[in-house]
Amino acid sequence: MLWRPTYHRRIAQLADACTTAFSFVLAYAVWSGLRISLPGTFGSEIQLTSDLYWVAATFSAVWVIVLSKMNAYTYQRFTSLRHEIVIVLKVSLIGTLAIFAVIFVLRVGYIARTYVCIFFVSNALCLMLEKIVIFRVAKKFRERGRNRKRVIVVGNGATAHKFVRTTEANLGWGLDIVGMVALISKEYLEEFQGKPLLGDASAMEDILHNHQVDEVIICASAKELGHTEAVFDVCEREGVQVRLNSDFFGRLAKGVSVDNVYGLPIISFTTVPDNEWLLYAKRLIDIVVSFIALLILAPALLSIALLIKLTSPGPVFYRWNVIGFNKKPFASWKFRTMIVNADEIKGQLMQHNEMSGPVFKIKDDPRITSIGKILRKYSLDELPQLWSVLKGDMSLVGPRPVGPHELVLYQSWQRRKLSIKPGITCLWQASGRNSISDFDEWCMLDLQYIDNWSLRLDFKILLETVRAVLRGTGC
């Protein structure tokens, strides 16, 4: 995870194995203490036999294998501590589930479920502490001149300028820049950013012969990428590690993956969140929250339905045909808040539209019923959409669903809203939806949500939405 040389990788693997074995012992000590303090709560006593030690040793080896599969030992000097901790949490969870499978499915001996849960916590904490220590120690070693790499930077534009400046500000990366190589043609300058200019890309072979170099880092703009092929070819022949830093990927950099499919190199770009674990967690939250909410709110939903039926003629629900994820159409439902022929007389009111763009909205809409005003004020008309969330057509948090008649009026950049599931609420609602009259601003908030999505952001939006609903700032 921290070094490329084999012996450093072996040290990291040994440290992970020892830490995992220690977490077994620590979990047993904690479990035993809790079992004595709260008798009858933590299961029967676990005998410390040689078999248990073999189990600990076996799973320590499994942990190292899983860490390897998660690319925990792949060379990456630019890795962040946060990235390492995320890997640790994933491995601890996968490993703990593996323990449950082996012990409780294959009936291998007796180990209390409470012990396994305590082990998960102790293992995650111990491995995180280990990574923090190793991360800090490796950084200090590099700052003091140990375990450093000699690199050549190919490029003489803004991308190279930024890379050199960033590298010098991060001594913990352990990179010593031997010199610069002009990508397109040799400049008259003898140095760049205080580093000597060794020549241009056409002389790359001689430059590698004359300088001891561990790696070559190409810093190229999108327009310069076509000139990098020769550098790659030379580095491949010479057996020199080469890396590419380019603004070609722009905002897509965090969503780039490289695969080799039957000998075909495939680079995949994604402009939406693609962390499967977090997306699974988001879906799980949607299912649990929508299911519980529908159960708890069932009496209120029935009461609202009765009020709608008694106060105005027509159906209780308004069938909402919309476009969802990846332009897939689906039907959702809201409580009806308007008169039955509201869609038919909409055209007569278009001149009073207060929103720019394809969305229609006017203050004191005459089509809204008396009970509808109350439902809209407190967003109660949105509650039936919890069923769409439970089904999977929608999410609790996401861009507003799009009507087919609206989509045809969307500009190209606005259509990226359809790259994720629509939601009941999003940034536009939490940010004060009554004050937003510019549809472009509305879309930009949705795209801001997509680009910065996290579970933490979802929770924040949900809390802000609850406050908005309680204040009665609905639309």
Image (spheres, rainbow, N blue to C red):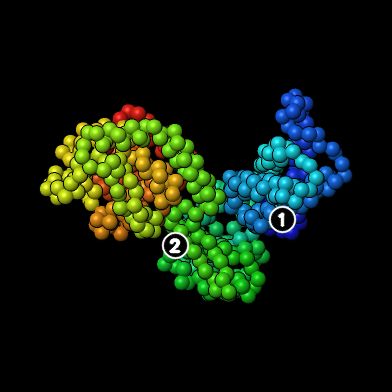
Residue drawn at 35 percent across, 35 percent down: 302
Residue 373, compared with residue 95, is above or below; it is above
Q: Is residue 382 left or right of residue 312?
A: right
Residue 390 shows which numbered tag? none
Per the image, label 1 sits on a secondary structure element best described as helix
Residue 248 shows which numbered tag? 2
Please state, as top left, top right, bottom left or bottom right, where the C terminus lies in the image.
top left
Residue drawn at 74 percent across, 47 percent down: 103
Residue drawn at 81 percent across, 37 percent down: 46
Residue 65 shows which numbered tag? 1
Per the image, label 2 sits on a secondary structure element best described as loop
Q: Nearer the viewer, residue 330 or 430?
A: 330
| Amino acid tagged 1 | Ile
Observer-side mark, 2 or 1, equals 1
Q: Position of residue 128 (x, y in %)?
A: 66, 42
Q: Nearer the viewer, residue 154 or 73?
A: 73
Q: Is residue 200 visible?
A: no
Q: Is residue 39 left or right of residue 196?
A: right
Q: Position of residue 249 (x, y in %)?
A: 45, 60
